[in-house]
Amino acid sequence: MLKHPDLRHPQFLTTREVADLLRVKERKVYDLAAANEIPHRRITGKLLFPADQIRAWIGGKDGSPERPDVLAGSHDPLLDWAIHASGCGLAMLCNGSADGLIKFQDGAASLAGLHLPEETGWNVGSVGSLGLRDAVLIAWARRRRGLLIAENAVGTITSVADLKGRRVALRQSGAGAALLLARLLGDAGLSEADLTCSPTPAH
């Protein structure tokens, strides 16, 4: 439940309270208000936010369907454990980061686990390009990437370029690891056509 500010207008939230609620900086809240992307009012020159409308804006109850209690996207063992240990009741539908983002955009999931590779980082550009209004992107964990190499190939594979002609087990299409490998292959002047591929089952 939202905590009302101790003001003459208890039905309103302050910029700081909205920032805390959204877990963003106050500057971001001012930017949202300036772009008219968040419910707000100016009362005697002060920027305030109607608490009931903010609840609806965050909860997606402004005419859009309510999202199901589903976590989509990338599979992660620690996240899987946390969901089950918390007893929150979220169902998990983990078919890769790209699939999770699509499901979230379509309103078929309440959350999506993502690790989508980009030129300058991860996830931010992919999510930002969709123009989502009712979404917050949270950095939850870091992953270390690498190749699992058969014992008889140790020492002969030192980079992605050495995978040419090799038999490689791939993640499912749309998984963050698959997208990253495709980019690294491209950087090495290769593609999946240069590999002997066998897809691995989705988690």
Image: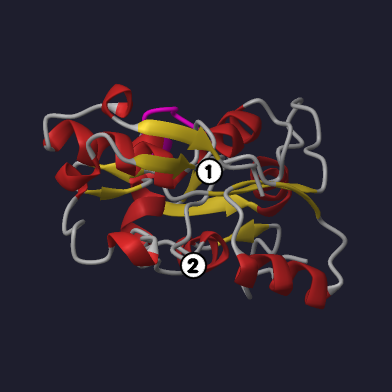
Tell me the quarter of the picture where residue 151 sits. bottom left
Amino acid at dot 2: Trp
Circle 1 is placed at which residue position? 40
- The secondary structure that most of the magenta stretch takes on is loop
Q: In the drawing, does residue 129 fall left or right of residue 68? A: left
Query: Which badge, 1 or 2, is on the more N-terminal residue?
Result: 1
Q: Residues within 10 Å of mark 1 (few under 14, many from 20)?
A: many
Quarter of the image that includes the N terminus: bottom right
Amino acid type assigned to the residue bearing label 1 in the image: His
Disc 2, SS: loop
Whole-percent x, y for residue 28 in the image: 36, 52
Tell me where the magenta segment starts and ends, as one range: 127-132
The residue that disc 2 covers is 140
**Residue at point 43%, 63% (across, down):** 139
Say what secondary structure mark 1 lies in: loop
Front-most of residues 172 and 81 = 172
Q: Is residue 87 left or right of residue 169?
A: right
